[in-house]
Amino acid sequence: VPMHKIPNLPLGKVQQRHVVRMFFPRLYGAAQLENNNYISQEDLALIYDRCLRPTLLEVVPEFRDRLPTSYAAAFAYSKTCNGGLAFNSLDIPWDRLERVAEILLARLGEQKSTFKDAYFVHELRGTKGSTMHDGENEVERHFAWQDMFEHVDVDTLDPQDWLVDVALTIGAEGHVVTWRESCHQELLSHLMPAAPPQKVSNLTKRKVKFHLDRTLQIKELSGFRATTTDLADDISYVQAYCTEKNVSYQLNPGVFRRRKPEELLEKKKEQKILADLDTISQIYYECAGDEEGVDGRDGCARLEIRTPLDKAMDALSTLPKELIERAVVAIDRRVWW
């Protein structure tokens, strides 16, 4: 079952990017029948009023003057004038976290049968590129590993149950570096030396397992995404792409969003599209380095693999120079943009 389909709620966070979620697997069946994986307001109130708040008062009595008296009160405190929600937070001392977790899970099971077997999931978001290092330097790899798992007790984990994405970035100052389609098979064979060449070749022809990501509709310039679980025990996924896409990628819909044909039928929307095109053109102009005082923006060829935790330290530390020279092409950024 995909995790995102199991009803869950964000319970807390560690620093800014580490979210702790609580999953309720016994709510999954009802959620599928209703085609809705959200936890109802009634259940959220029950979780806070009968489980979470009593647990915190027992383990962290210092919170007595800070905890909202009920879920309804907390919701009212958090609601903003424009209808959104803005949350406050409470810092639980680290040495009491284990007791909070144990008592909370026990109370949940006692309160309602569908709350039984709840479990915690730690979601580390926005960590991509947060541990940049020289892959050929063993000391730097070690410190990068420590930084990545700063909040995780690695010794208590089963390495085969945890997967880590390891990436290698190839760049050249003043250029956009991207991948050659003609070298995809060679690249995959290097990453999975035990896989028979014919099977690697067959993989690149299976649309279910292998997807091409063409650049500017140019045939030879292309990245890819490949599911490799059938070919290697230590690599389950491979992705090769160019970071120039970061210029137009937006988490929320903006000027680079996909447009609908009907937007051209309304004069006001058409004018907005033309204004956005001017904005996009200016962004690309600056990326090329043609704007006075703007240094321009490069692009890099990035290779990512997904590997078990115990293999991550030594995975993809580098690529042979000869392979890099064959597999990528560097284009002057003024020409590219």
Image (cartoon, rainbow, N blue to C red):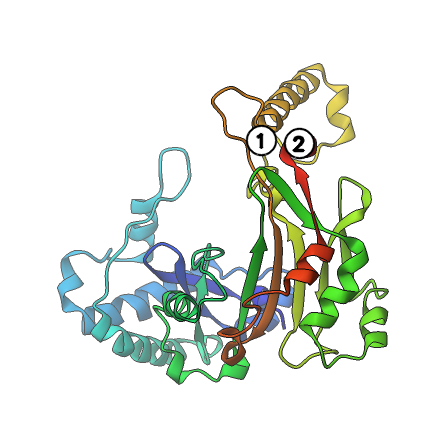
* Quarter containing the C terminus: top right
* Quarter containing the N terminus: bottom right
Count of numbered badges drawn on the protein: 2
Q: State the mark number for residue 287.
A: 1
- Spatial CA distance of label 1 from label 2 is 7 Å
Q: Compared with residue 107, is residue 20 higher up or lower down, i.e. above or below?
A: above
Q: Residues within 10 Å of mark 1 (few under 14, many from 20)?
A: many
Q: Which badge, 1 or 2, comes first in the chain's sequence?
A: 1
Image coordinates of residue 201 in percent, x first then y, are 84, 69
Q: Identify the amino acid type marked 1.
A: Cys
Residue at 86% over, 75% down: 198
Residue at 27% over, 73% down: 97
Residue at 23% over, 60% down: 91
Viewer-proximal residue among 110 and 329: 329
Residue at 52% over, 66% down: 7
In this rendering, position of residue 160 left or right of residue 269? left
Q: Which residue is mark 2?
A: 337
Q: Identify the amino acid type marked 2.
A: Trp
Image coordinates of residue 197 in percent, x first then y, are 82, 75
Q: Quadrant of residue 2?
A: bottom right
Do residues under tags 1 and 2 come within 8 Å of each other at their CB atoms? yes
Q: State the mark number for residue 164.
A: none
Q: Secondary structure at mark 1?
A: helix
Q: Quadrant of residue 275?
A: top right
